[in-house]
Structure formats: C-alpha cells, structure tokens
Image (cartoon, grey):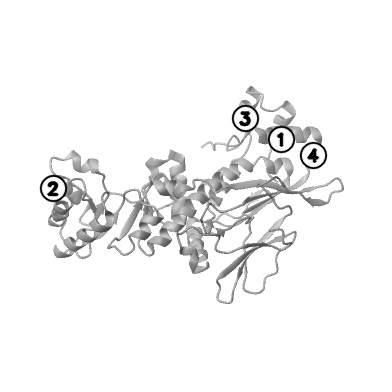
C-alpha cells in the first residue's frame, strides 16, 4: 500500500527559504530549532504535551516523492536547483523532546531539532500543526478528568470538528485520562477503547418508547445504557427498569438541569431496586460543569464540543524558532528573536523538573548550553526522539497515558483549581533571562 507523503503539509515560505539559503550557501549551516510556548493559555496553570507519536509518524512520511515534486514544479513554487535538493531530502539530524503526557509551562523547550538549517526549517509547520492541536485537546481533557475524579469521561465530539481532527482529539483525550471515545477511527488507528449505544433518533424511530427500549435491550443486553430524556424522564426511567430489570447498566440524561435530574433519577432508580444502575450525563459539558456536578449522583460524563475545541483554547500557541546556528568559523552561536511581545531565548536548551523532598514539582529549570544540575530529586524532561534521522522515541499510547497520570500527581495541589491563575510552578532559566 502506497504511503502518502506529508511533505505538502507545510507553508510555502518554508521552501522558498530553503531556495534562498541554497543560493546564499547557508542551507547546510548547522542549526538548532526549538519548539516552545511563550505562555500558557490565559488563566491555565499547566499544559499537557500530546501529539508526539503522531508527529513522529508524520516525520517518517515527510519525503518529496514524484507526486509532491510534480505539484511544486507545476506551480513554480521553487526553482530547479531546489527541486533537485528536495528530491533527495532525508532528515539526518537529531530531535529531542518532552515525551507525551508530560506537563509543560511557559518557555518549556518541548522539542529541540538539531540538523542543517534546510533540513530542520521545513519541519516547522508539520510539527507545530500537530503539537499545537493535540496539546490543546489534552490540556483541556486533563482538567476535565481531574475535575471528574474517579468518574469516567467519554469523548464524543467527533461531529463538532473536522473529521481528521476528531480522530486526533480522541487520541489526545484518551492520553489525558478519558476512558473511551465514540470515534471508531481512533480505535482502528490508535487502539482507543470505544463505546456507544443510541441517540434520540432511535427512540423517535419507534412507535413508542417502550418499543425502542425493548429493541435496544434485546439487542445489546440488560447492561446497555438507555437514553431517558426524549419525552418524560420519570416515565422513561420506570419503563427502562421494567424492561431491563435491576440489571440495567445505565441511563443517560442529555438535557435539563443535570444536577437536579440526576438526584431525582437516582432516587427513582433506588426505589425501583436498580441500585447499581449508573447515571451518565451529557449536554455541552466542560470542566466547570463537571466540577459543579461533583456532589451529585452522577457516574460518568460524556463530553463533546468543549473538548474538541480545547475548552476555549483550540491551539496551544507553540512557536518554532531558530535558537542557535553555526557561524563562519564553524562554532555554534546563540541567536534569538527580540521583537516586542514575542521574545525568544537563544541557545540550545536542556530541561528538568525541580522537585522537593516529597517529590512535588517546584520549578521548570532550563539550562542554556548545558544541562541544569540535578540536586538528587529532580527529573530530566527531554528524551531522544530521532537520532541521526531515525525515529528512536516511539512508544505506545498506554505508556503515555500512564505517564500523564503520574506527572499530574507530581504537581502542587493548587494545579487542580479551575479558577484563573498563574502557572502552578515557575520557569527558571539559569542565566536569569526571565
């Protein structure tokens, strides 16, 4: 099966920069690019790294095959010399990065790309587009699952976003603690568990609600979840237990005052003997509404629109900047953008999470030019992802998911607060730049 190239998932100017650099004789200068956030989304206390695995998959398919070269030639994007260079393009350098599931803070060096200028600059848009999206979803999902405590969250936002973004969002949500997704492509590609039963249309299809519930129970078993708010909730719950018995798996409420209704439905279920039947709520939930339902008899949450749009922050604001390059003597020198409000910090970075004696995170410590000193209880953050052009940092999604849960527990307790606030730990550069 032919593998589709990802080389055109980029911006026009990436290739025109390569053309100009080739002509100037600077394309092969040794360079270091850094992917990082200048800030967290307003009011957020931490961010979650996601999309690394997808980025590595896309990196391996970043080749300028005949079809791609034909598009570039036909549209006069670059000249013949550049087309010839692109035809043999293979990244030969190294990439380091924060692994998936890790936390990040302002100026965390999430990815370090070391190679020639031309080899590294063309990866900018590809890496940013994947990590900006997936990290935004994972960051929102992490807040939601923390607010839910031990109650499971179900991702069900596929119909609220682009079809491919839906698959990536399901993966990122699972990484950050969601239990299942409704998206079958996410199951196929990434092994994310899927779940689902029926919508209101199924009830409306039948002559009566009784007919609909009977058909679903006979097909899916007594452990299924019945949607009870198509008509009258009280009557629907009574019917549901009558048809499925006390073994009924769950009822789902998709409208109204969810807290009040959940309390009423719980009382009714218990009175009918369905004490183990769970209550699942849906209907435009986000982390705030989940937290507001904490004291209510709710057993699980279905989240859609808010999740796949990053709960108000659909991108992470990551940038990809040249921070070091070879000079005319062959030495690597620091370079940095210093324009107003868009400050970058030059130099090859190293990062560790400073922790106290109890293992609680205290600071994001960034070394410039050399690694920060570990005082014995700290944790290095950058891991090798690509070495000499070959992917070495691939891992399964279960590992990334476990890492996230572990790293999140490492944060100070105030990280759980949903109120607007500053990053839960400071970012410290060893040279005192910030």
Q: CA distance from mark 4 to mark 2?
A: 74 Å
Q: Position of residue 120 (x, y in %)?
A: 69, 44
Residue indicated by mark 1: 17
Residue 269 versus residue 304 in the image, above or below: below
Compare marks 4 and 1 and give the one earlier in the sequence: 1
* SS category of the residue bearing label 3: helix
Q: Estimate the spatial distance between the alpha carbons at disc 3 and disc 1, rounded to whole Å.
A: 21 Å
Does residue 400 show up? yes
Precedes in sequence: disc 3 or disc 2: 3
| Front position among marks 3 and 2 | 2
**Residue appearing at x 16%, y 54% in the figure:** 234
Query: Of label 3 and label 1, which has the lower sequence position?
Result: 1
Residue 121 left/right relative to 312: right
Rounded to the nearest whole Å, what is the CA distance between mark 4 and mark 1? 10 Å
Q: Residue 325 at what x, y percent from top left?
A: 77, 48
Circle on res. 60: none
Few, some or many residues within 10 Å of mark 4 (<14, 14–19, 20+): some
Q: CA distance from mark 3 to mark 4?
A: 26 Å
Q: Residue furthest right?
A: 329
Which residue is labeled 4 in the image? 26
Q: Position of residue 50 (x, y in %)?
A: 53, 52
Q: Are marks 4 and 1 in contact (CB under 8 Å)?
A: no
Residue at 32% across / 60% down in the picture?
293
- From the image, tell me which residue sits under label 3: 66
Q: Residue at x 42, y 49 (%)?
A: 307
Q: Are marks 1 and 2 in contact (CB under 8 Å)?
A: no
Q: Which residue is mark 2?
A: 210
Local SS, label 2: helix
Upstream in sequence: badge 1 or badge 2? 1
Crowd band around label 1 with a 10 angstrom C-alpha radius: few (<14), some (14–19), many (20+): some
Instruction: Give residue 49's position: percent from left, percent from top.
Output: 54, 55
Q: Residue sitting at 52 percent across and 46 percent down? A: 315
């Amino acid at each position: 099966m032919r593998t589709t190239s990802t080389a055109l998932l980029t911006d026009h100017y990436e290739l025109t920069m390569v053309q100009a650099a080739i002509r100037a004789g600077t394309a092969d200068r040794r360079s270091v690019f850094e992917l990082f956030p200048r800030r967290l989304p307003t009011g957020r206390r931490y961010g979650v790294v996601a999309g690394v695995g997808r980025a590595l998959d896309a990196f391996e398919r970043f080749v300028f095959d005949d079809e791609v070269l034909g598009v570039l030639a036909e549209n006069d994007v670059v000249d013949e010399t550049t087309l010839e260079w692109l035809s043999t393009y293979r990244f030969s350098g190294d990439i380091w990065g924060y692994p998936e599931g890790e936390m990040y803070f302002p100026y965390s060096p999430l990815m370090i790309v070391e190679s020639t200028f031309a080899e590294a600059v063309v990866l900018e848009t590809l890496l940013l587009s994947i990590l900006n999206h997936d990290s935004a979803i994972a960051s929102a999902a992490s807040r939601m699952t923390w607010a839910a405590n031990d109650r499971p969250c179900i991702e069900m936002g596929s119909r609220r976003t682009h079809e491919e973004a839906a698959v990536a969002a399901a993966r990122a949500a699972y990484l950050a603690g969601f239990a299942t997704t409704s998206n079958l492509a996410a199951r196929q590609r990434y092994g994310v568990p899927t779940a689902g039963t029926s919508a209101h249309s199924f009830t409306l299809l039948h002559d009566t609600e009784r007919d609909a519930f009977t058909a679903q129970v006979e097909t899916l078993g007594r452990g299924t979840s019945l949607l009870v708010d198509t008509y009258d909730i009280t009557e629907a719950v009574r019917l549901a237990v009558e048809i499925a018995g006390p073994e009924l798996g769950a009822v789902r409420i998709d409208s109204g005052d969810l807290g009040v209704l959940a309390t009423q439905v719980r009382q009714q279920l218990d009175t009918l003997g369905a004490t183990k039947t769970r209550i699942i709520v849906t209907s435009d939930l986000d982390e705030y509404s989940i937290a507001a339902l904490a004291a209510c008899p709710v057993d699980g949450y279905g989240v859609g629109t808010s999740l796949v749009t990053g709960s108000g922050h659909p991108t992470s604001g990551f940038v990809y900047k040249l921070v070091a390059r070879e000079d005319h003597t062959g030495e690597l020198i620091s370079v940095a953008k210093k324009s107003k409000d868009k400050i970058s910090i030059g130099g090859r970075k190293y990062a560790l999470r400073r922790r106290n004696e109890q293992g609680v995170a205290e600071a994001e410590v960034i070394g410039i030019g050399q690694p920060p000193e570990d005082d014995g209880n700290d944790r290095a953050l950058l891991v090798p992802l690509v070495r000499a052009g070959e992917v070495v940092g691939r891992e399964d999604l279960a590992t990334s998911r476990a890492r996230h849960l572990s790293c999140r527990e490492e944060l100070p307790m105030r990280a759980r607060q949903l109120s607007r606030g500053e990053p839960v730990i400071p970012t410290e550069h060893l040279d005192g730049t910030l």
